[in-house]
Image (cartoon, rainbow, N blue to C red):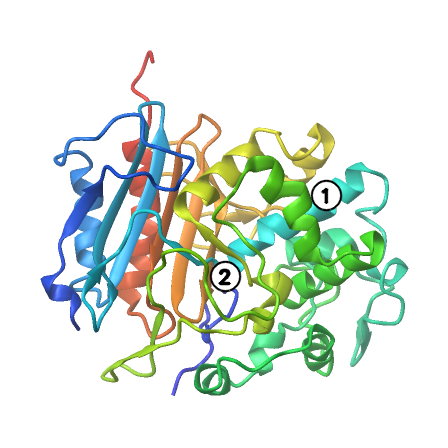
Amino acid sequence: MITLKRTTYKRAVGGLLVLAAAAGVTLSTQPDDAHARPNTAAPTAEYPHLRALLQRLTTTDGGPGALVALQNRSGRAVLTSGVADVRRHTPVRADSTFRIGSMTKPFVATVVLQLVGDGRVVLDAPIERYLPGVVRGHGNDGRKITVRQLLQHTSGLPDYLDYLKPQDVIDKPLTHYDTRDLVRLALSHRPSFAPGTDWRYSNTGYLLAGMLIERVTGHTYGHEIRRRIIDPLHLRQTSVPADTSKIPGPHPSGYVRKDKDAPLKDTTALNPTVAGASGAMISSGADMNRFLDALVHGRLLRPAQLRQMMTTRPTGSPDNGAYGLGLESHPLPCGGRAWGHDGGIVGYQTTSAVTLDGRQATVMANLYPGETDAQDKDMTATVRTALCAARPSPGR
């Protein structure tokens, strides 16, 4: 039986949310998508530490396949390992799309902050102003919870994923969920703490952020993400599915493992309404890198709103991580900080981060939940190694 995972940053479907021993690591020289070609073909001996980590992810760690897309001043590279499909033994493609889980949150937060910059939303106004009467019950009160607190996970609202049965989602992946029902499920429980007094990851806050976007603009959060982010940045492999269970474009199958000794279960087809604005999106390594780089360098937000997004508070994580408004910050072993987010949704585990000097990295494994602790650790190690391996030499 799968139980909800308790991690420092619980991913979009929380805890819902081996053949690989024969799989090798390849360094792709093909385009990582149709519009972003590597500047040069990297030698196969490049990035040895990354190659070793990917090999480990798809052998001793137990995952079917893995991918890392990175970029620095020298150009782009994509490394893949393992298989996209355990029955057909097809390799993971460099131009793969995949579900990104909670990496949806920076997109949603960006739209909200654009509305703040336009004067249509006030960051420190209560959510009651925009969703009157919605946040009520069992000590939860939208008159005392601000928009900022929703985006920064300081609202104290219960996380609706704590009260879904993980096995139901895995066994019935095509079930449609109504956002308001998920919010009501959360609000039938008492808050974790008084608003603004502590930090605890809550996907409920981002369901409400999606509802706020719809109330203010008259369009769904997905429509606004497409209009304000996807189209301007030409993110051709990024989409916001509504009720469709399919993943567009070439993609690895997504798998779960119900317990330690259980076989892999294919869960590629999933109705993303279980995640909604907290984690429903689909993207690729190249697109995620491009989005986060544009975000932290001010191409999507005005300076005042970007400062708000990147103003963080500690979360209590062992590595001194901090959380802003939909954006995580972690120190790197090679110095400096990485900005990004991680994600997990039935079938896929992902992490994406960039640095202010232009380094970018996105990692994907197609097993979640039911992954090993070693996979969790090596996903983090892979993105940090990718960013440090791509660090410009002194004087460049």
Q: Amino acid at mark 2?
A: Gly
Q: Is residue 29 above or below residue 165?
A: above
Asked whether 197 or 297 is in front, the reply is 297
User: Residue 219 at what x, y percent from top left?
Assistant: 77, 56
> Which residue is the site of mark 2?
101
Please tell me in which quadrant of the rendered image residue 65 appears: bottom left
Element type at marker 1?
helix
Q: Earlier in the sequence, mark 2 or mark 1?
A: 2
Q: Which residue appears at 43% of the width and 47% of the height?
A: 352
Residue lying at the far left in this picture: please name it: 22
Residue 266 is left or right of residue 288, and the answer is left
Q: Is residue 199 above or below residue 297?
A: below
Task: Bin the neighbour count of mark 2 within 10 Å (Cα to Cα): few under 14, some 14-19, many 20 and up.
Answer: many
Residue 72 is left or right of residue 19, and the answer is right
Inspect this view and state whether residue 380 appears: yes
Asked whether 119 or 174 is in front, the reply is 174
Q: Amino acid at mark 1?
A: Leu
User: Residue 229 at what x, y percent from top left?
Assistant: 62, 42
> Which residue is the site of mark 1?
113
Q: Which residue appears at 31% of the width and 58% of the height?
A: 377
User: Residue 286 at what x, y percent from top left?
Assistant: 41, 41
Residue lying at the far top in this picture: please name it: 395
Residue 280 is left or right of residue 87, and the answer is right
Q: Is residue 5 above or below residue 167?
A: above
Element type at marker 2?
helix
Task: Bin the neighbour count of mark 1 within 10 Å (Cα to Cα): few under 14, some 14-19, many 20 and up.
Answer: many
